Amino acid sequence: MNTSNLIAAISKHITLDEEEVSFFISVLLPVKIRQGEMVEKPGDTSKYFVHVVSGCLMSYYTDKTGIDHVIQFAQAGWWTGDLPSFTKQIPAIYSTRALTDSEVLLLPKTGMDDVLGKYLKFERYFRILFQNSLETHQNRLIQNLSSTAEERYLAFGKKYPSLEQFVPQKYIASYLGITPEFLSKIRRKLMEK
């Protein structure tokens, strides 16, 4: 599986020599996932941090009534997974599954520990990655608290321009914090404009 895009993304933040690249690639597990297949399930301990090479994954929380709440869509170039479960080795509360046939690189917990222990510069890369993720989640929280559903939908379209082609409406609505019926009303209203 091609790792060049991942290495290029990492190289935007840290400079790697051939040995470091080879070692990092050696701990990654390339996997092809079919549409609908689960990568993580609640209750299991997350063994991997997941990098999407191609396709799209969705991470979500299922509440006590069985309603799924979409936390993240991860497309090519994104990392995803239940981070607390992965880092603390506790039972996962999130599910992650493929919305399309996908190719991913799995970074095992032991592999990450080996990389971070052997090459401290990877600490910088993952710190930047986690800082960017926290910023994204905080911005989404502010948007959910202060924007209308229509504004959230328009922002979603800018952030994920191709997702509506293959993601069921109910998952987009969940991500936006609205019902699928209300999302339909928003779409109709925007088409009439």
Image (cartoon, rainbow, N blue to C red):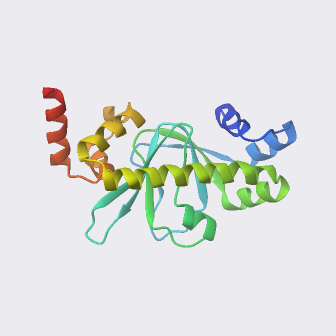
Q: Position of residue 64 (x, y in %)?
A: 30, 72
Q: In which quarter of the image is residue 193?
A: top left
Left or right side of 181 for 141: right
Left or right side of 64 for 193: left
Could you tell me which residue is drawn at 60 percent across and 53 percent down?
Answer: 131
Q: Where is residue 23 in the image (x, y as percent from the top left)?
A: 81, 46
Q: Position of residue 8 (x, y in %)?
A: 69, 33
Nearer to us in this view, 109 or 31: 109
Nearer to us in this view, 159 or 16: 159
Q: In which quarter of the image is residue 60?
A: bottom left
Q: Is residue 101 visible?
A: yes
Could you tell me which residue is drawn at 56 percent across and 61 percent down?
Answer: 83
Could you tell me which residue is drawn at 30 percent across and 48 percent down?
Answer: 147
Left or right side of 139 for 170: left
Q: Can residue 80 be seen in this view?
A: no
Q: Quadrant of the N terminus?
A: top right
Q: Where is residue 93 in the image (x, y as percent from the top left)?
A: 45, 67
